[in-house]
Amino acid sequence: MVAQRSVHSRWDGGLRAVVQAGDHELIVDEPESVQGGTNRGPQPTDLLLAAVASCFTLSIAYSAGKHRMEIADVHVDVTGVYDGPQFQAIRIAVRAAAPGGADLARLVESAKRVCYVTRTLALGPELTVVIEEGAGGDGA
């Protein structure tokens, strides 16, 4: 059996959507500089970068636990470089108070193998869009 994860999004007026992700509800919006945006939540591209940053951070923590390494003050900054309506590059910068040097490099290499989000982006998954008949509803 193939495991899956799904989220549901519904339009909430203007350029805003409410996303149900498990037990969590997120407001996604465009900035006020975009006509129709109200800046009530992060924009979709920021959520993509946030997914990369959070997954990579948690992968470092997971890897540290597996290797019995102490970590402290770990920060992951992710920057996307636009090329028209897409990112041409995504840069991940990692810094930590501990460990340093070769140990941090080992954790980063391990995180590259563990992080589902960066692995998915690197492998370029098949993207399929389908139209389901019926009126809105709960996404079921």
Image (cartoon, rainbow, N blue to C red):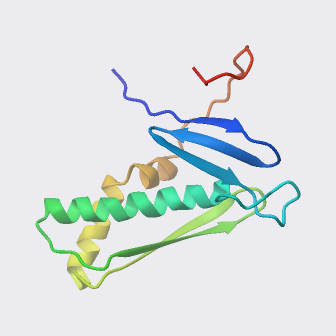
Query: For the point 23% across and 82% down, which residue is it?
Result: 98
Q: Nearer the viewer, residue 39 or 83?
A: 39
Query: For the point 25% across and 78% down, which residue is it?
Result: 72
Q: Quadrant of the C terminus?
A: top right
Relative to 4, say whether 25 is above or below: below
Q: Nearer the viewer, residue 121 or 71?
A: 71
Q: Nearer the viewer, residue 38 or 57?
A: 38
- In the picture provided, is 61 more to the left or to the right than 57? left
Q: Residue furthest left?
A: 68
- In the picture provided, is 28 more to the left or to the right than 63? right
Q: Quadrant of the N terminus?
A: top left
- In the picture provided, is 115 more to the left or to the right than 68? right
Quarter residue 74 falls in? bottom left
> Where does the image place residue 87, in percent across and percent down from the top left?
66, 61
Query: For the point 79% across and 49% down, which residue is it?
Result: 15
Query: For the point 49% across and 53% down, which residue is it?
Result: 122
Relative to 80, say whether 121 is above or below: above
Relative to 18, say whether 79 is above or below: below
> Where does the image place residue 78, in percent across and percent down from the top left?
52, 70
